Amino acid sequence: MAEEREYEVVDKRRVSADTSPTAGAEAESAAEGAQAVPESTAAEAPGTESGPAEDTGEPNFGAGPEGAMPEMDAVGLVSLCVSMLHEVAWVKLGLVPSPMTQKIEKDLPQARLAIDCAADLVRHLESQVDANTRRDLQNLISTLRMNFVQQSQR
């Protein structure tokens, strides 16, 4: 039984010192009429204003020009810690399943510790970030505290 080929897969990825693997594939796919996939903000040129570190106070984890991770400043590192504590607090409040076990388990003393530590770090960040980020961080802590009170009353 003969099969007709409706499509053909052609791997046009190339790796060389002067071009990146994604740049060549995007240029060729655009030339063929296919719509190129937009680059993420992590791949933008250094110094652009749309990077997460400038706009949101969140750390920028994009690779540097040589493919190495860029050095993170103190504000980015503290923001990362706040984000991690925020996630741990939700898990320990019993409102989100644990990413490891996929089970919902309530541990209010650990939730309180995560919330208090995140609040202290936010207090230190407030003078280092813009007004929108400051408001978002304050809302984050307020929401965690309100949920802690609700969970401790149940």
Image (cartoon, grey):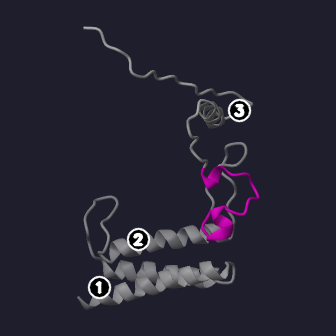
N-terminal label among 3 and 2:
3
Residue located 30% across and 77% down the image: 107
The CA span between labels 1 and 3 is 54 Å
Disc 2 residue type? Val
Residue 22 on image: x %, y %: 61, 36
Disc 3 residue type? Thr
Q: In terms of image quadrants, where is residue 18?
A: top right
Position of 33 relative to 56 (above/below) = above
Position of 147 relative to 101 (above/below) = below
Rendered-image quadrant of the C terminus = bottom left
The answer to whether residue 62 is seen in the rendering is: no
Q: Residue placed farthest to the top in the image?
A: 1
For disc 1, the marked residue is 151
Is residue 117 located in the magenta-colored stretch of the structure?
no
Disc 1 residue type? Gln
Residue 7 on image: x %, y %: 42, 22
User: Dot 3: few (<14), some (14–19), or many (≥20) neighbours within 10 Å?
Assistant: few
Q: Nearer the viewer, mark 1 or mark 3?
A: 3
In the rendered picture of this protein, how many numbered marks are placed on residues? Answer: 3
The label on residue 19 is: 3
N-terminal label among 2 and 1:
2
Q: Main secondary structure of the magenta part?
A: loop
The part of the chain drawn in magenta is 40-59
For disc 2, the marked residue is 88
Provide the secondary structure element on which disc 1 rests: helix
User: Dot 2: few (<14), some (14–19), or many (≥20) neighbours within 10 Å?
Assistant: some
Residue 145 on image: x %, y %: 41, 87
The CA span between labels 2 and 1 is 15 Å
Rendered-image quadrant of the N terminus = top left
Provide the secondary structure element on which disc 3 rests: loop
Residue located 62% across and 33% down the image: 21
